[in-house]
Image (cartoon, grey):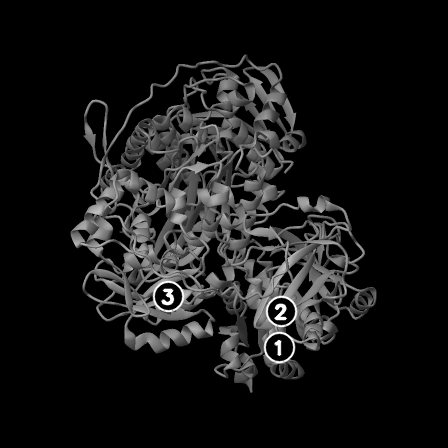
């Protein structure tokens, strides 16, 4: 047993001791020196740009960094394949990177991620196998309340005394104690992440009124509009869907991964989008992913290091790692990312928000959730199981503290997009020849959650010792709970096994029989013929009675500061477009593949300089057909923090204007809601209650159903001194829907100098609270803009008709940054300027320019086209001009003039 | 014989672990007049499909085998190990091999580009290295063929910077093997970012071997074949030229 190391770096890497460019070390166990020489030349070293050397030839001082043992390293599989193709068979392989320090220790500052370590001692073997720990019985029958609380804490179960008590009662009734498998499984099923306890609880107001749970209110309101939106599946599968065209159904899912991104941003973001993609494939009998939109909230990336809380990463590390994880994973999967929202707010510094929205498609005949039958085989497909990601579901449901990063680092995993891509390819083929009876994905809670769900109706028996492992030594409960990525479980008829396995082999995706569906409605776990867990499906899913939670409402503080009328418009304008929540995210968004798949209609970075983001994503999913899908997302933590009720209306309305501005048809659209809340105390639940009321009001106003939603109610960080930082209340609304023809879509790019610019919609100019303008002026104001819900649906409808009839040359949603930001986008995209008159709008010119009520700016070539808008509020505010400048008039006086180049410079992010 | 000539050339779009542009590439080839099939490399290894049945072999974009070790490396070793004879026979018969993006990287890693011979890694003469910007770039760029008019295609890659030693570079220039260069919208060949999105030597975006039968390029013609992608559908014209070359083979 010996490991041979091969160093590969750029030419002359041994002499260039810059430390910035590391060499890669490839490790092979049990090969000969001659074989190592061959691998170095024929597998590892590109003669044009690199040089390689077999160990023993480098004696310089160096710092070696590698993944911690057991962290998934996708390169290992390729090294084995490459070596075998050359006829060389190592027993194990590994990689690390080396910085030559030559006595200069400063390179030790190379940032390490949570999954990496500095190698201090050479390992003797790369093989990780250890002894398998035995199953333990957890004695709970005689524990008092304190004992139960202690047990919950020690095992990181995150269960409260009420839940622990219910579990104790159940096992007392059974006359035995639970095994570690059983108690861990119950904790996972009951976790906020999987159980959504808060969203399912009835709420009691201070006046003693009992309100239905958030989830049932949203469901009941939505059901009224199922027919209108042609809903095919909602609230019951891994994604929600509406009928499209040609027998296809559009399905969508949005999911956060906030806790993993907080502690290990790259892996957290990879597994976030990876999990959302699996939800699409885990829908019905297997959907297909079309594209993603990412929505992220971080703290200030320029935050001084001294202000970073102990136990937290710097917001910039969050931003960069999250970007790397999202883009790498999506790019490698070949799924385009068509939209990216990056929002910044100081309270997201300890715990960011990281959301992935994915839209997919599935044939109607495959869209029904499958039902396993008695005798069917339970198959695991995809990746192997390791210790990575144990307790992910429970950890993400708990409060984050200064110690979370260290204690729960095992909860985080790295993704392997290639493993997932070939699994999807294989499953799609299997589905098309009708081999899949039922399918679901392994996400939070791993097999425990996925198999518990797929076998819920009928019962299932699982042989944990048959699960393919990354290395020996996992306890049975660890196999059951591991959240190792890129795995799905499938139910198939035993007669289909040979064909299923044959297809999986072509695509090189492992498929293994690990159990069978029984018909006895029990969940039974075996390890080497011994029963290690046995719970009734009924107790597992409905055993803990739902609770009633108390809510309290906070009075809004009166704050009504406003800035003076600006004396330097150009400077204020530059500050607004340069604000972190308005400026160009092009430097980051450039790294995401926008065009893979060949379905992208509007370029996600469009315009003459390819740097303007359109309001929504538009794709044509079926090759050769004109049908389109429009998808828009909106959120506003600033307004939500001030007023969760108005903030929710604003977020929904903003999603709607973005959706319509990009060509979407509001009739027949469907929504996804994502609640990202600080905690579930009485006051935050009061805010949640108000927000759900506002959401339902918007569903009724626009006659749109929610078809899928998710909540994450653990956005707090407890500092070492005990004080708590809460994230702002955040709700992200996604609207998606179909259009018959992508050719009528308009973009925000001004088209013709001379044409008129109009503002369409009822602006609430009196309320400037929560705006970027007030933020840059340093004013506190709690009067947030109210959307006029009387005219709003009509505005959306008329605007859509105008776009569809080709009467509008360009269109842009007004939202954050107001008209000012919208006009600048239209100019940046076209290179043309604008002359704007803000007089006669019934308010101060600056209020008009920077007000953030959701509305539209449109470009029309002839004023006669405005005839269409006579039933809704609209105002002509100026003209497109050829000169690259924006001229602002207040009645007859020119108050500001700013060159486009000047403004663009302020807008470009010095990322 | 007349019937034979009218037949659409057959294109095999190779699939392998990590390749992800196979669907749109197949669709684009069909639009360009070919009859295309997506075939997994394992189905060729097993004999279920044969390279000999096709006039065009296409290695599409993606991240074959994760681009582990280096982009295209493992896929190139797969070609060397399992398909070298079939591919060389295909070429000797005057048939075409096209690599797009990751496919181009595979052709360079296997030696098929620039000099048309499958070699081991130590015998290769060029490389597609990490972009000068240090990261993945997704954007539309202008490219042109010789003195032709510039046209617009998307690129989406992290490793597209063409690099070779001086001798190789002058040899492929002298042989006229450079088929596409990055340029400005007015057609000036450019080394400047973002016109040249990756810092390629001599602004090289695509090359062929001496015979002209093995072609590789970083931009994605298959993503510019429909009206809504680009008014001029330059990618479709590019692929039609390739399909026309393969007619009657």
The chain under label 3 reads A
The verdict on a common chain for dots 1 and 3 is yes
Distance in Å between CA atoms under marks 3 and 2: 30 Å
* Residues at discs 1 and 2 in contact (Cβ within 8 Å): yes
On the rendered image, what quadrant is the N terminus of chain A found in? bottom right
Q: Which residue is mark 1?
A: A88
| Observer-nearest of B244 and A621 | A621
Between marks 1 and 3, how big is the CA–CA gap?
30 Å
The residue labelled by disc 3 is A380
Residue that carries the numbered disc 2 in the rendered image: A28
Q: Residue furthest front?
A: A142
Of the numbered discs in the image, which one, if any, rests on residue B93?
none
**Circle 3 SS class:** strand
Q: Quadrant of the C terminus of chain A?
A: top right
Compare marks 1 and 3 and give the one earlier in the sequence.
1
Answer above or below: position of A501 versus A665.
below
Near-viewer residue (A607 or A653): A653
């Amino acid at each position: 047993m010996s490991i041979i190391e091969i160093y590969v770096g750029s030419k002359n890497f041994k002499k260039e001791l810059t430390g910035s460019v590391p060499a890669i070390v490839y490790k092979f166990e049990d090969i000969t020196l001659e074989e190592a020489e061959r691998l170095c030349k024929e597998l590892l070293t590109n003669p044009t740009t690199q040089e390689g050397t077999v160990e023993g030839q480098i004696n310089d001082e160096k710092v070696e960094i590698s993944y911690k043992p057991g962290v998934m390293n996708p390169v290992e599989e390729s090294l084995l394949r490459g070596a075998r193709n050359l006829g060389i068979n190592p027993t194990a392989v590994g990689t690390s990177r080396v910085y030559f320090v030559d006595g200069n220790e400063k390179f030790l500052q190379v940032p390490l991620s949570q999954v990496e370590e500095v190698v201090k001692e050479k390992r003797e073997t790369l093989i990780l196998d250890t002894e398998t720990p035995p199953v333990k019985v957890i004695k709970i029958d005689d524990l008092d309340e304190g004992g139960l609380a202690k047990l919950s804490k020690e095992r990181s179960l995150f269960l409260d005394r009420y839940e622990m008590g219910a579990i104790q009662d159940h096992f007392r009734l059974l006359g035995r104690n639970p095994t570690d498998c059983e108690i861990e499984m119950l904790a996972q099923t009951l976790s906020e992440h999987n159980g959504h306890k808060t969203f399912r609880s009835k709420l009691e107001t201070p006046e003693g009124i009992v309100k239905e749970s958030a989830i049932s209110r949203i469901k009941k309101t939505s059901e009224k509009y199922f027919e209108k939106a042609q809903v095919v599946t909602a609230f019951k599968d891994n994604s929600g869907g509406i009928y499209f065209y040609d027998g296809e159904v559009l399905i969508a899912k949005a999911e956060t991964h906030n806790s993993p991104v907080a502690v290990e941003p790259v892996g957290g973001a990879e597994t976030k989008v990876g999990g959302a993609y699996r939800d699409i494939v885990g829908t019905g009998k297997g959907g297909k992913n079309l594209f993603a939109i990412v929505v992220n909230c971080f703290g200030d990336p320029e935050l001084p290091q001294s202000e970073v809380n102990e136990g937290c990463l710097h917001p910039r590390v969050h931003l960069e790692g999250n970007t790397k994880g999202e883009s790498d994973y999506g790019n490698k999967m070949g799924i385009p990312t068509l939209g990216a929202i990056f929002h910044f707010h100081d309270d997201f510094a300890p715990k960011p928000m990281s959301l992935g929205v994915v839209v997919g498609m599935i044939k109607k005949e495959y869209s029904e959730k499958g039902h396993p039958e008695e005798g069917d085989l339970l198959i695991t497909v995809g990746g192997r199981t390791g210790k990575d990601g144990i307790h992910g579901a429970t950890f993400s449901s708990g409060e984050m503290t200064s110690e979370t990063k260290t204690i729960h680092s095992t909860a985080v995993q790295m993704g392997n997009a290639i493993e997932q891509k070939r699994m999807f390819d294989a499953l799609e083929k299997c589905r098309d020849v009708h081999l899949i009876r039922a399918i679901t994905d392994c996400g939070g809670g791993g097999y425990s959650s996925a198999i518990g769900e797929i076998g819920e109706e009928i019962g299932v028996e699982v042989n944990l010792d048959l699960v393919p492992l990354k290395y020996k030594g996992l306890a049975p409960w660890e196999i059951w709970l591991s959240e190792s990525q890129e795995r799905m479980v499938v139910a198939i008829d035993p007669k289909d096994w040979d064909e299923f396995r044959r297809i999986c082999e072509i695509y090189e995706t492992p498929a293994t029989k690990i159990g069978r569906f029984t018909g006895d409605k029990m969940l039974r776990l075996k390890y080497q013929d011994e029963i290690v867990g046995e719970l009734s499906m009924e107790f597992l899913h409905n055993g803990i009675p739902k609770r009633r939670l108390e809510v309290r409402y906070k009075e809004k503080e009166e704050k009504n500061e406003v800035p003076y009328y600006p004396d330097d418009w150009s400077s204020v304008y530059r500050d607004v477009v340069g604000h972190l929540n308005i400026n160009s995210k092009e430097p980051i968004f450039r790294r995401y593949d926008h065009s893979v798949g060949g379905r992208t209609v509007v370029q996600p970075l469009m315009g003459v300089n390819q740097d303007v983001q359109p309001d929504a994503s538009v794709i044509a999913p079926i090759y050769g057909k004109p049908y389109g899908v429009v998808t828009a997302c909106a959120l506003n933590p600033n307004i939500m923090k001030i007023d969760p009720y108005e903030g929710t209306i604003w977020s929904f309305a903003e999603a709607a204007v973005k959706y319509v501005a990009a060509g979407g048809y509001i009739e027949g659209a469907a929504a996804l809601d994502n609640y990202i809340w600080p905690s579930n105390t009485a006051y935050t639940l009061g805010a949640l209650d108000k927000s759900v009321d506002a959401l339902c009001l918007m569903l009724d106003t626009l006659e749109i159903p929610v078809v899928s939603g998710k909540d994450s109610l653990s956005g707090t960080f407890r500092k070492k001194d005990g004080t708590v930082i809460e994230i702002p209340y955040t709700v992200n609304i996604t609207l998606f829907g179909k259009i018959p023809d992508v050719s009528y879509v308009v973009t925000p790019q001004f088209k013709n100098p001379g044409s008129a610019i109009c503002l369409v919609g009822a602006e609430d100019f009196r309320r400037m609270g929560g705006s970027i303008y007030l933020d840059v002026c340093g004013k506190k104001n709690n009067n947030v803009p109210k959307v006029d819900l009387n005219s709003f649906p009509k505005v959306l409808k008329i605007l859509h008709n105008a776009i569809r009839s080709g009467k509008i040359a360009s269109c842009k949603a007004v939202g954050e940054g107001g008209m000012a930001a919208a006009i600048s986008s239209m100019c940046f995209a076209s290179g043309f300027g604008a002359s704007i008159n803000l007089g006669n709008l019934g308010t101060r010119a600056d209020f008009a320019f920077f007000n953030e009520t959701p509305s539209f700016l449109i470009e029309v070539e002839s004023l006669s086209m405005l005839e269409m808008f006579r039933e809704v509020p609209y105002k002509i505010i100026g003209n497109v001009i050829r000169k690259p400048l924006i001229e602002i008039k207040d009645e007859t006086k020119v108050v500001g003039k700013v060159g486009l180049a000047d403004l663009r410079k302020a807008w470009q992010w010095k990322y | 014989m007349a019937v034979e000539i009218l037949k659409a050339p057959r294109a095999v779009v190779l699939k392998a672990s990590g390749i992800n542009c196979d669907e749109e590439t197949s669709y684009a080839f069909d639009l360009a007049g070919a009859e295309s099939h997506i075939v997994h490399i394992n189905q060729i290894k097993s004999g279920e499909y044969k390279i000999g049945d096709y006039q065009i072999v296409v290695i599409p974009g993606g991240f074959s085998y994760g681009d582990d070790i280096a982009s295209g490396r493992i896929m190139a070793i797969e070609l060397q190990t399992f398909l070298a004879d079939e591919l060389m026979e295909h070429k000797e018969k005057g048939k075409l091999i096209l690599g797009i993006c990751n496919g181009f990287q595979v052709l360079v890693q296997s030696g098929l580009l620039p000099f048309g011979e499958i070699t081991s890694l130590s015998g290769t003469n060029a490389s597609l290295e990490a972009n000068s910007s240090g990261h993945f770039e997704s954007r539309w760029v202008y490219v042109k063929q010789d003195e032709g008019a510039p046209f617009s295609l998307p690129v989406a890659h992290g490793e597209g910077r063409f690099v070779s030693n001086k001798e190789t570079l002058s040899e492929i220039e002298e042989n006229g093997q450079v088929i596409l260069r990055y340029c400005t919208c007015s057609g000036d060949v450019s080394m400047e970012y973002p016109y040249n999105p990756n810092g390629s030597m001599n602004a090289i975006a695509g090359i062929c071997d001496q015979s002209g039968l093995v072609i590789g390029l970083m931009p994605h013609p298959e993503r510019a074949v429909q009206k809504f992608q680009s008014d001029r559908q330059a990618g479709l014209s590019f692929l039609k030229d390739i399909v026309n070359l393969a007619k009657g083979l």
